[in-house]
Amino acid sequence: MTLDDLPHVDAIEQASFSAPWSINTFRHEIQSNPRSFYWVARPLAEQDSGQDSGQNPGVATPPIFAYGGYWLMGEEAHIVVLATHPQWRRRGLAEAVLIEMLAQMRSVDVNEVTLEVRSGNVAAQELYRKLGFEEVGRRKRYYRDNGEDALLLTLFHLQDGKVAG
């Protein structure tokens, strides 16, 4: 993710979350947080025209399909965000970003990965469980916007290589 990506990331962020991060938060993360790492999934070159790719009729191809980020803390990492453009969900794009992030974490000897997910976000929970994350706790009324609980998920033993990537 670069600073030039931020307007596109912000559009996805605003459409995806009821309590979205601001562009300034992402800017700070990219410029000032040495522990943060962010990734984006872009269209292939032939799709860059913004025209309909034929895979999603009537929808222009966005400059960024999905993005994700994590904080690196020694042998542990914490996934702080993962989102897909609303019109391009359920196509494996967030999974591809997540697998790439996990591969990058593995390359720097991360062994344990944590994240929080809304208790009502079943689609995200399914993705995380598919890749081996386990529920290890619940943070009651974690989300300030509506008081929803967060499930705390952990992927143990990343170095064992059981996750694709």
Image (cartoon, rainbow, N blue to C red):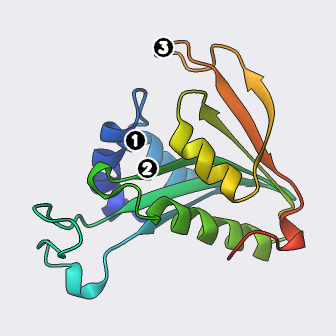
- Tell me which numbered mark, 3 or 1, is placed earlier along the sequence: 1
x 74%, y 34%: residue:
152
Cα distance between the residues tagged 3 and 1? 23 Å
The residue labelled by disc 1 is: 24
Looking at the rendered structure, the secondary structure element under dot 2 is helix
- Tell me which numbered mark, 2 or 3, is placed earlier along the sequence: 2
Q: Quadrant of residue 132?
A: bottom right
**Visible residue check, residue 77:** yes
Looking at the rendered structure, the secondary structure element under dot 1 is helix
Q: Are marks 2 and 1 in contact (CB under 8 Å)?
A: yes
Q: Quadrant of residue 61?
A: bottom left
Q: Is residue 90 above or below residue 115?
A: below
Cα distance between the residues tagged 2 and 3? 26 Å
The residue labelled by disc 2 is: 27
- Number of the label disc, if any, that sits on residue 80: none
Looking at the rendered structure, the secondary structure element under dot 3 is loop
- The percent coordinates of residue 42 (x first, y second) are 36, 72
Cα distance between the residues tagged 2 and 1? 5 Å
x 67%, y 56%: residue:
130
